[in-house]
Structures are given as structure tokens and as C-alpha cells.
Amino acid sequence: MAFSFTNPFMPLFIQGLGNFTDREAAFWTGLATSSFAVCMLLTGPVWGILADRWGRKPMVLRAMFGVAALSAAIGVSPNVYWVVGLRGAQGLFAGSMAAASALVASDTPRDRIPFAMGLLMVASYGGSTLGPLVGGIMADAVGYRACFFIIGAVYFLGGLAVIFFTKEGFKPVAKGQGASVRGLLHIAMSREIRPLLAVICILFVGPSIVLPTITLLIKELGAQSNTASVSGLAFSLMGIVATISSIVAARMTGRTSLKKMMIISCLGTGLLYLPPMWAPTVTLFIIFMAFRGVLSGGLMVPANSLIALSVSQSEQGMAYGLQQSASSLGNTLGPLIGAGLASLIGLKAVFPAAAALFILAGVAVVKLLPDLSNR
């Protein structure tokens, strides 16, 4: 929830820091998002190695408390350069989802991992449903800066919940068999993981291409006085649809091939990214954007499950560290591509680009990915 809190108002917050135009605000929002992602890209493998050496729960706590402090710091940023820098610093400590995935995978029987990952994605998308709605309302009510202190408090409370209510059955591996850079490289280059990381990267490029422009398009289509609230509603509806999709995907994991689920979801999602570019009103734009997430569960539930099924239990921290780097690379490239297209061609140019990437991901799954559903 806290992670998606700023989605409806980040471009507006940045716009107010320097009286930027819509296109300039989209550019700086994309740059801030990319700075966060590129730092996650660099630190993901490091945290993965430490997770396999010292345990996954400490890595969740590192992410929660680190991002809590830095979120509050963004609330006192004097200019856009501070925002970009602090977002990058957040990326150095972030990765709670990757750490949580490793924690869940390590304590779950292998034949139940797809279902467990489905539940984790339901929690993730459920939070992303509440975050933008609450964030948009709070932004209009108390101001943009105050929202960053609220985000910090939510992360801090989440960290306390992990301390007191989460137990981990971590068993360190024998001396000499622990996680290492060599082991990390071996996993990264394996026949199962390498193509999967490439597909995950593409899956994260697609949504992040459109992220910097959604709020600005809503403003352009007519929501002038309450842009943050309307944008929050749009992001929340997308989250609701994605949550339902994850529930369905979790229930289907034992009945259908994970690879087949990903192929259908990639191709279908690509087509669903086209209607928003033709929406003539705010209402239709929000509806089309919500339907874009109908197949989201069929993308991420199989992808996260295949990561766990591709490695041994003692290597899952490193595997999810690599997954964090792949997703962060996608989140780095996506906003930059989206901001560039928005600045050069127009805000709506991001939608056909995202559609093409999801179709490319579907083709890559067909050609490159082994099916590990029955491992």
C-alpha cells in the first residue's frame, strides 16, 4: 500500500517544485522512478546473497525500515534534484517484495509454491488497490509533503509487524556451501533462470512506460481541480482488477501449466493496452486502464513461482535477488522510455509501445521458457 501511495500525485508534487510543464513533469517523474529502480537493480543480488547467508526475515526488515526513513526525507525535499536523489537512496534499501517472496518460498512445500505465490500477489495487489485511493484523497486533503511522512509511518508499522508476528525457519547451509558471487553468476546463467529473467524484465518495462503519464492524461482529459483524487481512483481500480486476477491465477496454478498461463496473459495484456489511447473521457480512460489488469495475475504469479521452482531452497534468496534486479531494470527502462515518448511524441504514445512489449514477452515465453510446473 505504501509503495503505491504516491502514484496519483508524484507528477503533481514534482510539478510544484519548479513550475514545470506537463511534459517536463512527466520527464522528472520518470527520472525519479528510474533512479529508484536502477539502485534496486544494483543492490538486488547483494541482498540476495546476504539473505541466503543470514536469513530472509532480516532482509524484509532492512527494506521496511530503510524506506520508511527515506520516505520521510522526501517530504522535506527543497527541489526536484533532492527527490531524484532520495528516490535513488530508497532503491538501495528497498526490495521488500523480493525478500518476502524468498521468505515465503523457503518455508513452503515445493508443490504449494505457486499457490503461496498467488496469495502473496493478492496481498501485493490488494495493497496497491488501497494505496493510490488513500494517497490521492490524502494528497488533496493534507498536501503532498505530508503524504510522505504518512508513507514512512506505514513502512515503519509494517516493519514492526514483521518483527513481532513473522517467524522464519531459516537453516544456514554448511560452511563452504554458502551463497557467493560465483553461485549467483551460476544461477543467473542457468538455462532455466536466464530466459525467465529476460521475460520478467520485459513484463516490468510495459507497465512502467505508462506510469509517468497516467495522472497527466487524466488532467488533460478534464479532471483539473481534483486530479490527485481521480488519479487515485484510477490506480485503485487497476489494483482491484489485478487483485481479483491474482486470486483466480492462484486457484488455477494446480490445474494448468504455468507456461501456458503466462503466454495467454502476455498476449492478452498486450491487446488490452491499446484501448486507453482512444478514450475520449476520463471515465472511459479509467475503465480501460482498469481492464488492462484483467490478466495481471497470470503474469506475475507464474513468473514468481518459476523463480522458486528453478533453484534449490538454499539458493532462493539469490534467485529472488536476481529477480529484483530484472524487475528493477524493467522499472528503470520503462519510465525513461515512457518519459521520452511523452516528451517527443505525446502522452498517448506510451500505450502502443507497452502493447508491443507484452506481445514480445509472450513470444519470448513460447520460444525460451521451459515449463517447470511439475518439478
Image (cartoon, rainbow, N blue to C red):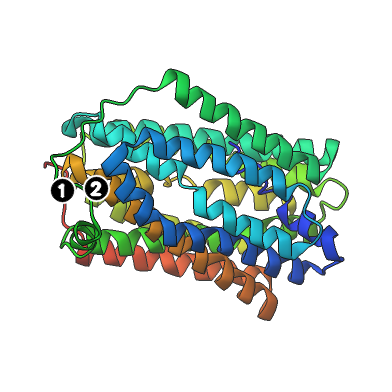
346 in relation to 375, above or below: below
**Residue at x 20%, y 58% (from the top left corner):** 187
Mark 2 and mark 1: Cα distance apart in space: 7 Å
Q: Which residue is mark 1?
A: 372
Q: Earlier in the sequence, mark 2 or mark 1?
A: 2
User: Which kind of residue does numbered mark 1 sit on?
Assistant: Leu
Give the percent coordinates (x, y) of residue 263.
29, 56
Residue 73: x percent and y percent?
Answer: 71, 47
Give the image location of residue 286, x and y in percent.
Answer: 65, 48
Of all residues, the one furthest to the front in this rendering is 175
Q: Evaluate whether residue 110 shows in this view.
A: yes
Asked if residue 58 lies left or right of residue 24, the reply is: left
In which quadrant is the N terminus drawn?
top right
Q: Residue flagged by tag 2: what amino acid is it?
A: Leu
**Which residue has dot 2 on it?**
306
The front one of 109 and 223 is 109
Q: Does dot 2 land on a helix, a strand or a loop?
A: helix
Which image quadrant for residue 118?
Answer: top left
